[in-house]
Image (tube, rainbow, N blue to C red):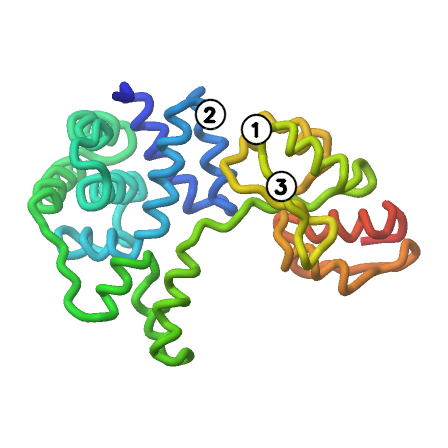
């Protein structure tokens, strides 16, 4: 069983707090995990899975918190993070979760560093209610929300757009883990070179049928220790994002105004297509 310390729980909570402030969220997670020296460890994998699972099930998790305490959006960010973790672990995690046991024991002490004493007492009362609460979907939409990790308001909208027999197929499809996509920076490497290197690393890569410079693999992938990423030979980017720059297809002498660059994947792709000439 993975040994979880107070330091580990604090890292998990801080990652969730920063997740709400920095986008994309995985950048926030890496910043925190690096500072707590758990990045790349077995704890990194476990905590990352928890954070992504909380994000997917946040609609249900927040409903449970709201019923037993208050609207999560109205409470202290550290209190919100702790209640989201304990709610996820209790209602959706492993039955004998070591993380849940450690969080129950250590969270009040950790939270005292970030919240007022009266909120600690509120946390304990909310925790007791959440641990004794059993969530039961009240209608078909909530049942789909529970099963397919999608907020009920979005399911309602999709239901109005699709034939009824297509709704379940759509919900099942969007819950399948997508492959990891990399755009090859052709100023520094060829698609063939990246394909061979990923194969050498034990992956089974394939080239996108839509964008010939996008290579895909099934994860996980260790971004922090990737030489290909560090050397600028690959950029995390999927087909649809890479396709935009190809459609624009600027010439090296052109001036391009990118009105929505964040984090800048398309911007660097445009620079690559323009051979690092012209202006962006």
Residue at x-position 54% and y-position 34%? 221
* Picture residue at 19% right of the left edge, 51% below the top: 65
Residue at 25% across, 56% down: 60
The quadrant holding residue 93 is top left
Q: Between tags 3 and 2, which lies in front?
A: 3
Pointer 3: what residue?
205
Question: Which of these two is toward me, 33 or 71?
Answer: 33
Circle 3 sits in a helix, a strand or a loop, which is it? loop
The total of numbered circles placed on residues is 3
**Mark 3: few/some/many CA within 10 Å (<14, 14-19, 20+):** some
Residue 5 seen in the figure:
no
On screen, 11 above or below 250?
Answer: above
Q: Nearer the viewer, residue 210 or 160?
A: 210
Residue holding disc 1: 224
Pointer 2 with pointer 1, Cβ within 8 A: yes
Confirm or deny contact between disc 3 and disc 2 (CB under 8 A): no
Q: Work out whether 34 lies above or below 75.
A: above
At label 2, counting other C-alpha atoms closer than 10 Å, the crowd grade (few under 14, some 14-19, many 20 or more) is some
- The alpha-carbon separation of the residues under discs 3 and 2 comes to 25 Å
254 sits to left or right of 99:
right
Upstream in sequence: badge 3 or badge 2: 2
Residue 201: x percent and y percent?
A: 61, 28
């Amino acid at each position: 069983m993975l040994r979880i310390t107070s330091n580990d729980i604090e890292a998990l909570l801080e990652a969730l707090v920063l997740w709400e402030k920095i986008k994309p969220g995985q950048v926030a997670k890496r910043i925190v995990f690096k500072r707590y020296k758990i990045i790349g460890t077995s704890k990194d994998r476990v905590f990352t899975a928890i954070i992504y699972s909380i994000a997917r099930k946040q609609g249900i998790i927040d409903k449970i918190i709201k019923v037993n305490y208050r609207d999560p959006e109205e409470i202290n960010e550290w209190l919100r993070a702790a209640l989201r973790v304990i709610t996820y672990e209790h209602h959706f995690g492993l039955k004998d979760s070591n993380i849940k046991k450690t969080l129950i024991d250590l969270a009040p002490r950790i939270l005292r560093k970030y919240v007022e004493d009266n909120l600690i007492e509120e946390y304990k009362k909310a925790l007791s209610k959440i641990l004794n609460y059993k969530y039961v979907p009240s209608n078909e939409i909530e049942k789909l929300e529970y099963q397919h990790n999608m907020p009920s308001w979005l399911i309602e909208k999709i239901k109005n757009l699709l034939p009824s027999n297509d709704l379940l197929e759509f919900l099942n499809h969007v819950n399948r883990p997508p492959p990891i996509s990399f755009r090859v920076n052709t100023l520094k490497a060829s698609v063939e070179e990246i394909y061979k290197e990923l194969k050498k690393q034990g992956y089974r890569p394939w080239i996108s049928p839509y964008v010939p410079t996008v290579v895909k693999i099934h994860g996980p992938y260790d971004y922090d220790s990737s030489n290909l990423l560090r050397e600028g030979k690959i950029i995390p980017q999927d087909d649809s994002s890479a396709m935009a720059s190809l459609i624009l297809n600027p010439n090296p002498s052109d001036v391009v105004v990118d009105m929505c660059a964040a984090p800048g994947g398309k911007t660097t792709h445009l620079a690559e297509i323009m051979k690092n000439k012209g202006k962006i």
